[in-house]
Amino acid sequence: MAIRTIDVALPDRLPEERTWWSALWWFVRRNPLGAVGGFLMVLLIGSAIFAEVLATHNPVRTSGRVLVPPGAEYWLGTDNLGRDLWSRVVHGSRISLVVGLASTLLGAGLGGLVGLVSGYLGGKTDLVAQRLMDIMQALPILVLALVMAAALGPSLMNTVVAISVVIAPRAARLIRSSVLAIREFAYIESARALGVGHGRVAFRHILPNTFGPFIVLVTAQLGGAILAEAALSFLGLGIPEPYPSWGRMLSIAAAEYARKAPWLVIFPGVAISLAVFGTNLLGDALRDTLDPRLRGS
């Protein structure tokens, strides 16, 4: 009895590993709005890093050219003190990005640590910690930030602390929910059965698996932090003068010069809107990409 053989044509070469460019192109095709948000974030980061190069004038130097409309010399016009608005908007991106990133990372880090410990230990520790988080989260975001900023005083560091306190409860709730699901997995039970300490289980085996939700949280909360900084500066409780903050620009121009010099309101407002819009779009796209339950939906 003859045995027939089947010839299988092998490919000339194995498929290449996905490169950064191919992964980026896949992300752009799958989430075009997220790509737009990423592009806006790249513009924000680039303007913050290269603010000294992009600025055409000293952002804090006053002059006699008061309320000059946008033109060739002053691209976005000047304010009531003769300061170049384009240079102030560019340098304001640095303030917004530093405050947004610092407050988001600080608040998410502290809140994530509380959520990790309370979710892993459970019992009375979880009960007390979550009730404190509920009390903090029950207050409106801006009200809590205003109370903290008013108590600490207007400064760069105090603004970061005030906004981070607002972000911490949301980070704690999110990380806790992830920890409650992860701690029931089989490999966690196996580690406990082998006598692995609680600290090693929590920080070595559970914490790395919460990085996906943590990245999504940081990206999503960054826009809220930038908006909160602008609101605090608008009310005089955020970044003090002479630092060029977008919210401070609006507070100076909104009441007295909005009709006479509308560019004082339009351009800082557009900058805030694009920054918040970009972070929200990118955060939603990262959530859809990193959350396996939303893939393919």
Image (cartoon, rainbow, N blue to C red):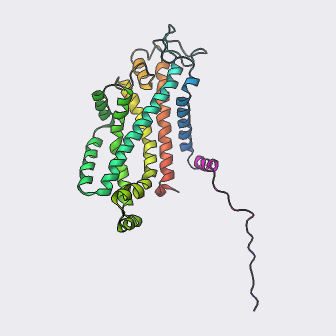
Describe residue 58's horizontal placement relative to residue 223 as left or right.
right
Quick one: 293 or 16, which is closer to the camera?
16
293 vs 37: above or below:
below
Instruction: Name the residue furthest top.
Output: 64
Quick one: 280 or 155, which is closer to the camera?
155
Name which residue lies at 73% across and 68% down.
Answer: 10
The region drawn magenta spans 10-31
Q: How many marks?
A: 0
Q: Is residue 15 magenta?
A: yes
Instruction: Name the residue furthest bottom.
Output: 1
191 vs 256: above or below:
below
Residue 100, horizontal then vertical, whole percent: 43, 35
Give the position of the N terminus as an image quadrant: bottom right
Name which residue lies at 74% across and 87% down.
Answer: 3
Residue 261, horizontal then vertical, whole percent: 48, 15
23 vs 155: above or below:
below
Describe residue 105's horizontal placement relative to residue 49 as left or right.
left
Quick one: 265 or 116, which is closer to the camera?
116
Describe residue 283's horizontal placement relative to residue 160 as left or right.
right
Name which residue lies at 54% across and 14% down.
Answer: 69
Q: Is residue 11 magenta?
A: yes
Describe residue 19's horizontal placement relative to residue 126 as left or right.
right
Name which residue lies at 53% across and 37% down.
Answer: 41
Residue 66, horizontal then vertical, whole percent: 49, 10
Rendered image quadrant of residue 137:
top left
Residue 75, horizontal then vertical, whole percent: 57, 18
